[in-house]
Image: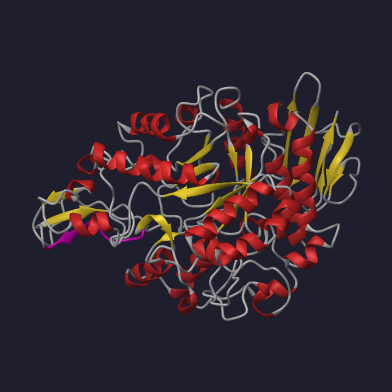
């Protein structure tokens, strides 16, 4: 395997709780994932990013880890995990473990010890500040609402948490913490995993006294040390979640020197449909020219100096076909293919979130049916501060993390084939029309379009190496660009809406070979609703 195999790879993200239930308890599990490996092999993916399956009280769906060294019983056993790694490897698929190293659960044995006494050996594993009950050290807020400080009676201190109060932040300034976490990583490397995805890794070097959370002064020092002490000098894939990354920072993270990560997730494009300076719940329409500008910036500035990750969806984001496509019966398939075309023509490593390859859509629950801690907290907080229920629910329908967490839609049978009993969260009712079984057998499906895009990326080097050039930068309906090497050139052309668009000489589309088209052809001089195609010269 080439050391940089991941540059031509496609990675599939699995949210285990909602992927496939093998034992009829309503929760997805590791054996369920094993049973679907052939499906993923058929799609053509090269690696699985596995969201946390460690022992956890599940207050934040596994991103609150109580034991890094074992598998939560609801997902199976450590033996099941070893079997998954082995069975995936047989199909040339590697497993990326999701690592949460910024914080633990408050039920982690480290924290249970740390909160007992200031003299406890584990006390300095976390971030503490002296204070007076009811008067936090400063006014910092947690991402999920409320203060970022929680009082601990036993020590007369506040502990710091960037997320929920059940997720205390680790103190990376303590070398013993770093060594303990490196031992965790080495444990999983020895189990045979092929890489790690690092949750909110840009927040590990926080300086709460100065209200610094992301991109703290020692961040790159910590990452380079972790790289040196734990990542094998082999074909290992690492990706960091970095909400605050800029292209300059991303060059440090993903430099060809390889002393930090293979790549990072940056989220500049994901923030374009919220009011600047406000929360993600404060909605505004997406402006296509902004989206093109952001993609063009990252494609241009990281060329030959870093590496992009490419994604529309993940477990924290709404479904892209509902967000920026059109999830109506008439246009769902066309717009899902169009969005995939835009992304898969770019330079970087694409990530598919489970169900994206089917064109799965957002959900509209009653508030009582939501499970996500962030969603429930923001509902209570906004209702309390005077927002109308209608406004709050509009934001939740658009941005709740539970949009991504509905059970995977395998077939049209009871519970979408996900489980033989009532799932932990309600299935999207449209599973009867949108499901894997019907799409795999349909040559015109979203699934088979993704499958073809993946095969094209592996066949033509221009997808990996080509230099990017944005076309029609000021056009508010057309998203078009070229990628070019000395021997190959592709042009990606997409209509980002349902109105027919006249090209009017804006693009020279009369020559070239069609590699893929969501209509099966292309017409001279115009683009139909959500039309997308890729041509090769």
- Point out the stretch of residues depicted in magenta: 144-153
The picture quadrant where one finds residue 321 is bottom right
Please indicate whether residue 44 sits to the left or right of residue 60 in the image.
right
Q: Where is residue 306 in the image (x, y as percent from the top left)?
A: 55, 27
Q: In which quarter of the image is the C terminus?
A: top right
Please indicate whether residue 398 sits to the left or right of residue 492 in the image.
left
Whether residue 532 is situated above or below residue 299 in the rendered picture: below
Q: Residue furthest top?
A: 486
Q: Where is residue 472 in the image (x, y as percent from the top left)?
A: 72, 34
Q: Where is residue 74 in the image (x, y as percent from the top left)?
A: 48, 69
Q: What secondary structure is the stretch in magenta mostly built from?
A: loop
Residue at left offset 23%, top offset 47%: 125
Residue at left offset 36%, top offset 60%: 144
Evaluate whether residue 414 shows in this view. yes
Q: As rendered, which of 201 and 43 lies closer to the eye?
A: 43
Residue 152 shown in magenta: yes
Q: Residue furthest front?
A: 79
Evaluate whether residue 267 shows in this view. no
Q: Position of residue 491 (x, y in %)?
A: 79, 33
Number of numbered discs: 0
Whether residue 335 is situated above or below residue 225 in the rendered picture: below
Q: As rendered, which of 118 and 510 lies closer to the eye?
A: 118
Whether residue 212 is situated above or below residue 141 in the rendered picture: above
Residue at left offset 90%, top offset 46%: 521
Residue at left offset 65%, top offset 29%: 2
Q: As rendered, which of 52 and 193 lies closer to the eye?
A: 193
Please indicate whether residue 442 sits to the left or right of residue 386 in the image.
right
Residue 260 shown in magenta: no
């Amino acid at each position: 395997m080439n050391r940089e195999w991941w540059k031509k790879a496609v990675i599939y993200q699995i949210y285990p709780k909602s992927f496939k239930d093998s034992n009829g308890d309503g929760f997805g599990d590791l054996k369920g994932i094993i049973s679907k490996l052939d499906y993923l092999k058929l799609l053509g993916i090269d690696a699985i990013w596995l969201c946390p399956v460690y022992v956890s009280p599940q207050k934040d769906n596994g991103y609150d880890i109580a034991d890094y060294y074992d598998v939560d019983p609801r997902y199976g056993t450590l033996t099941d995990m070893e079997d998954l790694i082995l069975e995936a490897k047989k199909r040339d698929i590697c497993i990326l473990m999701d690592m949460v190293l910024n914080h633990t659960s408050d039920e982690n044995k480290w924290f249970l010890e740390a909160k007992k006494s200031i003299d406890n050996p584990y006390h300095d594993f976390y971030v503490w500040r002296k204070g007076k009950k009811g008067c936090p050290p400063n006014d910092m807020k947690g991402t999920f609402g409320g203060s970022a400080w929680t009082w601990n009676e036993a020590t007369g201190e506040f502990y710091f948490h960037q997320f929920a109060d059940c997720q205390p932040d680790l103190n990376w300034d303590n070398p013993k913490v770093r060594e303990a976490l490196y031992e965790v990583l080495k444990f999983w490397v020895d189990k045979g995993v092929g890489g790690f995805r690092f949750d909110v890794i840009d927040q590990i070097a926080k300086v709460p006294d100065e209200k610094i959370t992301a991109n703290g002064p020692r961040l790159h020092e910590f990452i380079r040390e972790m790289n040196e002490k734990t990542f094998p000098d082999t074909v290992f894939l690492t990706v960091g979640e970095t909400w605050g990354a800029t292209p300059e920072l991303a060059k440090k993270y993903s430099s060809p020197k390889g002393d930090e990560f293979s790549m990072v997730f940056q989220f500049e494009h994901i923030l374009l449909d919220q009011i600047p300076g406000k929360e993600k719940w404060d909605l505004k329409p997406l402006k296509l020219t902004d989206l093109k500008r952001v993609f063009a910036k990252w494609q241009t500035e990281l060329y030959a100096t870093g590496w992009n990750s490419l994604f529309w969806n993940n477990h924290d984001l709404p479904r892209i076909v509902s967000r920026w496509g059109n999830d109506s019966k008439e246009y769902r398939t066309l717009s899902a293919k169009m969005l995939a075309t835009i992304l898969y023509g770019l330079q970087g490593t694409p990530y598919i979130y489970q169900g994206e390859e089917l064109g799965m859509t957002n959900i509209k629950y009653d508030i009582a049916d939501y499970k996500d801690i962030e969603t429930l907290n923001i509902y209570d907080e906004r209702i309390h501060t005077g927002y109308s229920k209608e406004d709050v629910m509009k934001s939740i329908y658009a941005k709740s993390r539970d949009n991504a967490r509905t059970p995977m839609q395998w077939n049209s049978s009871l519970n979408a084939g996900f489980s033989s009993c009532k799932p932990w969260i309600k299935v999207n009712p449209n599973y009867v029309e949108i499901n894997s079984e019907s799409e795999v057998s349909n040559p015109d499906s979203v699934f088979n379009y993704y499958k073809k895009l993946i095969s094209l990326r592996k066949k033509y080097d221009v997808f990996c190496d080509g230099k990017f050039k944005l076309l029609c930068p000021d056009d508010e309906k057309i998203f078009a660009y070229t990628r070019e090497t000395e021997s190959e050139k592709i042009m990606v052309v997409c209509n980002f809406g349902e109105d027919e668009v006249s090209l009017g000489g804006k693009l020279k589309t009369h020559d070239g070979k069609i590699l893929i088209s969501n209509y099966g052809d292309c017409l001279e001089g115009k683009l139909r609703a959500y039309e997308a195609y890729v041509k090769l010269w």
